[in-house]
Image: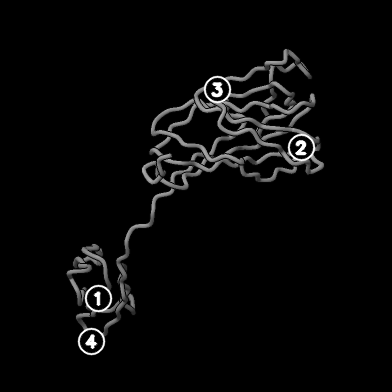
Amino acid sequence: LIARVLPSDATDRSVTWASDNEAVATVSPDGHVTARSLGKATITLSSNDGGFADSIVVTVQQAPVRIDRIRVEAESFAKMGSTSGKKPGGFDGVNATQSGINWVNSGDWVEYQADFPSDGVYALTYSISTPMDGAKIQFQLDGDVRSDDVVPNNGHWDDYRSIVAGSVIQIKKGRHVLRLVASGPNQWQWNLEHFQLTKIRDTRKLGKH
């Protein structure tokens, strides 16, 4: 907390800090507040000249649940290629732009590496756009297909919209290889801006079947 004593040319500008509940929060002579336990404490500032005072109520709460989120920019791929052998526009797979990837044909793929901070179940979303019917995007984790989703036709190549994958992904802590494959039947597929994996629950909370 910061103390301001006015006027600025006052002869004695010294102050005293105090907490009415040091079991919850203490305050140092320079106004630094330290949380000790859950609850509320009133921190009071008193001027040593004139006895003026002001106070603030500090509430110490449980720390919020940590949200693990991995956002991957589409153009940041480590590898790319094509299983179809087609090279539209001279690109062997896809074309990287400043804000995503385009020229994506069926069978083209891009590969990324990502470090996950904890075990968990993750929701997968894409920021993606296509004017084509039947376009699909497949998500692979370390070589295993985990989700295969239709990309809705929104009438544009670069009107990026968020779509949620139909499958949630169980992922262990550590580094993994993520691969996206254009898996629809038509030649032209989609443009991708980024994709994101957001932890929605811990693995240990999964039921056994």
Q: Which x, y percent locates residue 23?
A: 17, 69
| Circle 3: residue type | Ala
Q: Which x, y percent locates residue 149?
A: 66, 36
Q: Is residue 146 visible?
A: yes
Q: Nearer the viewer, mark 2 or mark 4?
A: 2
Secondary structure type for disc 2: loop
User: Are the residues tagged 1 and 4 within 8 Å (C-beta)?
Assistant: no
| Circle 2: residue type | Thr
Distance (Cα) linking label 2 and label 1:
66 Å
| Circle 4: residue type | Gly
- Give the vertical position of 31 relative to 203 (above or below): below
Along the line of sight, the residue nearer the viewer: 159 or 148:
148
Q: Which x, y percent locates residue 171?
A: 45, 34
Quarter of the picture holding the N terminus: bottom left
The first of marks 1 and 3 along the sequence is 1
Along the line of sight, the residue nearer the viewer: 49 or 138:
138
Distance (Cα) linking label 4 and label 3:
67 Å
Along the line of sight, the residue nearer the viewer: 31 or 136:
136
Query: Pointer 2: what residue?
Result: 130
Query: Pointer 4: what residue?
Result: 50
Query: Pointer 3: what residue?
Result: 78
The first of marks 1 and 4 along the sequence is 1
